[in-house]
Amino acid sequence: MPDKELNTENALFERIAEGEEQALDLLYEHLRPKMEGYVLKLMKKEEAVMDILQEAMIRLWLNRDKLPSIQYPLTWFFKIIGNECFRYMRRYGIPKTFLSQLEYSYQGEVSRSTELDISYRETQRIIQQVIASLPPRNREIYQLSREQGLKMQEIADKTGLSFLYVKKVLVATLKMMRQKLREAGKYTSLLLFWLFI
């Protein structure tokens, strides 16, 4: 994938994380050919494609607060699409033989669920340590953003701080989290973790 395209996608995910609905529309238009091909390959049913993509986009929007701490947002998003395919099959009674074949092809990732659980707990522990180590004001900003889902401008208004200060704190906090995870050697386990959240 060209660097320019990757940078465009990453920028759109950042804007979505900040609550920008227009970025969600732009990401959909940008990824639509890839997403439609992916869903059609999994489902073999054209009529399922739009339903699944709509549900995946809704799920992305509802979980946008997770995006800043996800190292590979595009991979994470395609995992959401894959999960929506399984939900669709269960909901509409796709024959079990087909579902079994699809799950078999998917099993390489699914079979690592125990490793992922361990990685998830370890990653969460590291993130909680970073949050606990933050000065009270920075911790409040982080929690307003990630736990309450407020946009940066809303945090600035609520706390009486400048928008730039809020942005600076969030960027520094996420950078610190990435550094701590890197120091803990979470390269592979983080990739697996982000695929399954």
Image (tube, rainbow, N blue to C red):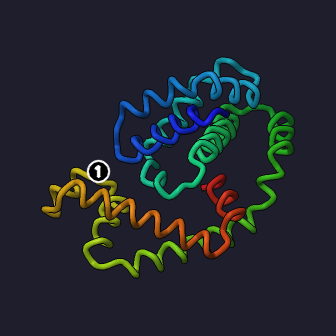
Mark 1: give few (<14), some (14-19) or many (20+) Cα within 10 Å: many
Q: Would you say residue 91 is visible in this rendering?
A: no
- In front here: 89 or 117? 117
Q: Residue beneath label 1, please?
A: 151
Position in image of residue 165 (x %, y %): 24, 60
Whole-percent x and y of residue 21?
A: 36, 34
Task: Specify the quadrant that holds the N terminus.
Answer: top right
Residue 52 locus on image (x, y percent): 59, 31
Q: Is residue 136 left or right of residue 71?
A: left
The residue type indicated by label 1 comes to: Lys
Q: Is residue 94 left or right of residue 7?
A: right
**Residue 123, quarter of the rendered image:** bottom right
Q: Is residue 147 above or below residue 44?
A: below
In the visual, does 164 lie left or right of 34? Answer: left
Q: Residue furthest top?
A: 46
Q: Seen from this angle, which residue lies furthest left? A: 160
Query: What quarter of the picture does the C terminus occupy?
Result: bottom right
| Residue name at image x 78 percent, y 61 percent | 112
Residue pictured at 42% horizontal, 53% vertical: 65
Position above or below: 37 against 137: above
Q: Would residue 171 be seen by someone viewing this image from the given angle?
A: yes
Q: How many marks?
A: 1
Q: Secondary structure at mark 1?
A: loop
* Residue 74, x across and y down, in percent: 59, 42
Q: Which residue is at a point 46% across and 40% down the rendered structure image?
A: 11
Give me the residue at 67% from left, 68% from top. 117
- In the image: residue 15, left or right of residue 77: left
The answer to which of 9 and 155 lies nearer the viewer is 9
